[in-house]
Image (tube, helix red, strand yellow):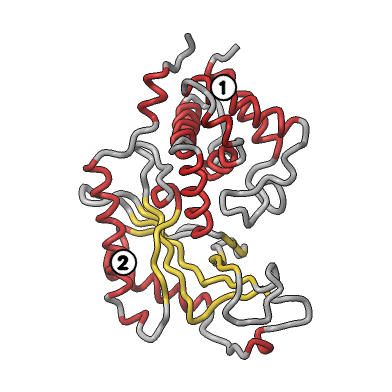
Amino acid sequence: MGIYSEEILTKYCSVVSDTEAKKIENAKSMIKDAVNDSNEFSGLDYEIFEQGSYANNTNVKFDSDIDVCVMLKSTFYGEYPDGLTYKDYKFEVGITYDDYKRRAVRALNKKFGDVNMQIGNKSIKIKSNSYRVNADVVIAFQYRDYKSVNSKNPDIYTEGTKFISGSNDSVINYPKQHIFNGKSKDEITNLGYKKLVKIFKKIKNNMEEKGLIDAKKISSFLVESLVWNVPNGIITNNDSWLETVKVAIKYLHNEIKNNKCSEWREVSECLYLFRGKRKWTQQDAQDFLLKMWRHMEYK
């Protein structure tokens, strides 16, 4: 038997404790109050929603920070079909992203104070205390992709989020599609998909603690996206988690090694997993899976 028993892997599937869940809810509620009660957002059309592992129910114990997006809708970023601009849709220029972010920072600062928040590269980080968990607040514009659906109708588009990082990079995400697709795959796999994601994430965390992998390259998001590309049958057709994990690792590793992953996408299905500017490469993912296999002591 390897270092992981069936009992251990089953425990990795469990949800966070009631105490931890309450602290997560407290953090989310305080962020919403900070925005909704602030004059900084008067006259703006915005939406506040959860994203990330907690919203997707793929968070693991002691790794349950809350991710909240504060998305402006009255001003948005648009991607238009070739030859068209915002003027063809009768849109007007709104506030700048920098202005919006400054407003959000002031609103959060009033609620949490300087000592409890830090402006990071991609989010505003709210520190935890005995009442709440750590939180990452993403300040974004709504992203309307008219080009991918070739729409000339201002109300028909693919919705995402877009923000400018501290390093001046444009970051586009599709958190709502991610949540929807994750729920769908979980239902199709008899609630096995998200459990397998949690097992992979917990093992990844254990490997990080042992210094076996580079956490900057092998993110939780990458791990969840890899499991997303595991065929449903692998998740449902095995009799134990030990066997399911074994078959899943083998499948993912061999597909990547044989370069059969060029069409793989994130959970949202809106972005390719191994194309464009990424913190990871195919080789990084392949190496991680091989190390995971050895760490699990599979034969």
Residue at screen point 64% across, 24% down: 250
In the visual, does 160 lie left or right of 132? right
In the visual, does 259 lie left or right of 27? right
Q: Position of residue 269 (x, y in %)?
A: 62, 53
Vertical placement of 172 versus 102: above or below?
A: above
Q: Position of residue 213 (x, y in %)?
A: 56, 30
Kind of residue indicated by mark 1: Lys
* Disc on the earlier residue, 1 or 2: 2
Tell me the element at label 1: helix
Q: Quadrant of the C terminus?
A: top right
**In this figure, which residue is indicated by the disc labeled 1?**
246
In the visual, does 3 lie left or right of 78? left
Vertical placement of 138 versus 89: above or below?
A: above
**In this figure, which residue is indicated by the disc labeled 2?**
32
Residue at screen point 62% across, 75% down: 78
Spatial CA distance of label 1 from label 2 is 42 Å
Q: Position of residue 36 (x, y in %)?
A: 30, 74
Examine the image and state in which quarter residue 20 appears: top left
Examine the image and state in which quarter residue 46 appears: bottom left
Tell me the element at label 2: helix
- Between 1 and 120, the one lying in front of the other is 1
- Between 234 and 131, the one lying in front of the other is 234
- Label 1 packing within 10 angstroms: few (<14), some (14-19), many (20+): some
Residue at screen point 41% across, 55% down: 67
